[in-house]
Image (tube, rainbow, N blue to C red):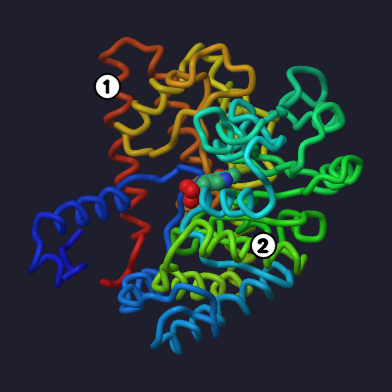
């Protein structure tokens, strides 16, 4: 790609420019199948790279601790109006810097250290911040973890009976639903009913699904959850950031003081403006079309991989995620991830439920369609991608020479496909 980007940076700091330019080229020349990533619009990049980064704005619109906040107030109010419309909720806090911090803010607002929490285990596709041992959520709270069914008709699906049993036994103060690898629709109402039985708070972390929900193709948790957290940069395709939503006035008051001054100082107002832009984009009818393509691309990818002899965890997908089980092919996640990266496909190794291999090796891969769909890859392309992935992974079982031959031809194919769909069509 020509160096038409980031002109000022190139002039004043060639060293950093070089890293950014190489990253731009990597994004252009690889097929991005990391499920948590996406490609924002140029308008989002403009807002995020703007003068709003110069401004301190501790506090909330209309009640800041600094002068000169008139226009950043405007930007935050636009973002608030749009996000409330998008998710049909009454209140929002848009200041958390990241998904992990949004979750921390909810914990700070509603819990005390050593309280019991109930979340989905990392090994079943949950997130670190829902009570995993190495995370603050697993260190400062008594974290109980639920998982998915090991066998039977509902193998790999959330074990709601286990959730209920653990809830009744342990009486957690909060139950958390939401996941990072789980590709299916989560039954928010079932969680709500369980939480009601023990008068626990019910929190949904919709980080992975928030774009699908905005596009009205995944159930909106807002009517069931006491509080909803999310990142804004995954399927929602916004700035790298997060948000907290609720319909409960008492909870928003507690959340607001937990975010600031409880946990953070000044909000990132350039990111706030970029979020406003992305909410605006998600409110447009085109976004629904985009989300339906994201989901149909994921379904085609899953079907193609099944036809080629792989197993998909849960048997398929209702979302942007395709969770691949490599055990039928006797392959491991780490080797598969490395070889795919070599040929130009970015994805990540991911443990499968009840994985026999350790977390650094794993028996699975996680794919996602949001980023490639954003640049234009369609159903036909995803069938090709599914076959390419199968060719490459099957080649791991061939002799070195034959494997190299397969990989070389795939590399060329991928460069061709990528050049058809530039990630940005104009300079920024
Ligand atoms: C990605 C993710 C997060 C963390 O978001 P960061 O912005 O990386 O901190 C939290 N929860 C879930 C379910 C996620 O998938």
Judge whether 194 appears above or below 66 on screen. above
Judge whether 132 appears above or below 84 on screen. above
Q: Is residue 197 left or right of residue 42?
A: right
What residue appears at the point 43 percent right and 21 percent down from the top-left corner?
A: 360
Q: Earlier in the sequence, mark 1 or mark 2?
A: 2
Which residue has dot 2 on it? Answer: 254
Which residue has dot 1 on it? Answer: 404
Label 2: which secondary element: helix
Q: How many marks?
A: 2
Q: Nearer the viewer, residue 172 or 420?
A: 172
- Residue 144 seen: yes
Q: Pinpoint residue 85: horizontal percent, then vertical percent.
A: 69, 75
Judge whether 393 appears above or below 17 on screen. above
Q: Is residue 186 left or right of residue 266?
A: right
Q: Nearer the viewer, residue 312 or 175?
A: 175
Q: Nearer the viewer, residue 227 or 353?
A: 227
Label 1: which secondary element: helix
Q: Nearer the viewer, residue 10 or 147?
A: 147
Q: Residues within 10 Å of mark 2 (few under 14, many from 20)?
A: some
Q: Residues within 10 Å of mark 1 (few under 14, many from 20)?
A: some
């Amino acid at each position: 790609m020509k160096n038409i980007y980031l002109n000022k940076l190139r002039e004043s700091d060639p060293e950093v420019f070089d890293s950014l330019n190489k990253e731009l080229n990597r994004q252009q020349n690889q097929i991005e199948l990391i499920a948590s990533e996406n490609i924002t619009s140029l308008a989002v990049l403009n807002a995020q790279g703007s003068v709003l980064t110069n401004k301190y704005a501790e506090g909330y619109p209309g009640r800041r601790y600094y002068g000169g906040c008139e226009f950043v107030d405007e930007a935050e109010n636009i973002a608030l109006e749009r996000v409330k419309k998008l998710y049909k909720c009454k209140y929002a806090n848009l200041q958390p810097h990241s998904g992990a911090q949004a979750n921390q803010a909810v914990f700070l607002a509603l819990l005390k250290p050593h309280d019991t929490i109930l979340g989905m285990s990392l090994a079943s596709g949950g997130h670190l911040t829902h009570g995993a041992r190495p995370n603050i959520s697993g260190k400062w709270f008594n974290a109980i973890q639920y998982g998915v069914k090991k066998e039977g008709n509902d193998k790999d699906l959330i074990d709601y009976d286990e959730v209920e049993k653990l809830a009744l036994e342990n009486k957690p103060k909060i139950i958390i639903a939401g996941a990072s690898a789980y590709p299916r629709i989560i039954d928010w109402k079932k969680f709500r009913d369980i939480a009601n039985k023990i008068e626990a708070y019910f929190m949904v972390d919709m980080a992975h699904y928030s774009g699908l929900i905005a596009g009205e193709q995944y159930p909106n948790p807002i009517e069931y959850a006491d509080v909803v957290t999310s990142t804004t940069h995954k399927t929602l395709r916004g700035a790298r950031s997060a948000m907290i939503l609720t319909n409960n006035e008492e909870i928003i008051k507690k959340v607001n003081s937990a975010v600031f001054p409880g946990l953070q100082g000044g909000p990132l107002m350039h990111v706030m403006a970029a979020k406003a832009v992305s909410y605006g984009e998600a409110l447009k009818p085109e976004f629904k079309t985009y989300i339906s393509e994201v989901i149909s691309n994921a379904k085609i990818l899953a079907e193609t991989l099944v036809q080629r002899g792989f197993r998909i965890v849960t048997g398929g997908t209702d979302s942007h995620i395709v969770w691949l089980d490599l055990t039928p092919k006797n392959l491991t996640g780490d080797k598969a991830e490395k070889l795919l990266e070599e040929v130009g496909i970015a994805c990540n190794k991911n443990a499968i439920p009840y994985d026999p291999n350790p977390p650094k090796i794993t028996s699975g891969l996680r794919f996602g369609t949001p980023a490639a769909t954003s640049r234009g890859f369609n159903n036909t392309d995803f069938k090709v991608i599914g076959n390419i992935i199968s060719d490459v992974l099957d080649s791991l079982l061939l002799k070195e020479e034959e494997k190299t031959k397969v990989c070389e031809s795939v590399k060329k194919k991928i460069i061709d496909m990528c050049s058809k769909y530039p990630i940005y069509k104009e300079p920024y």
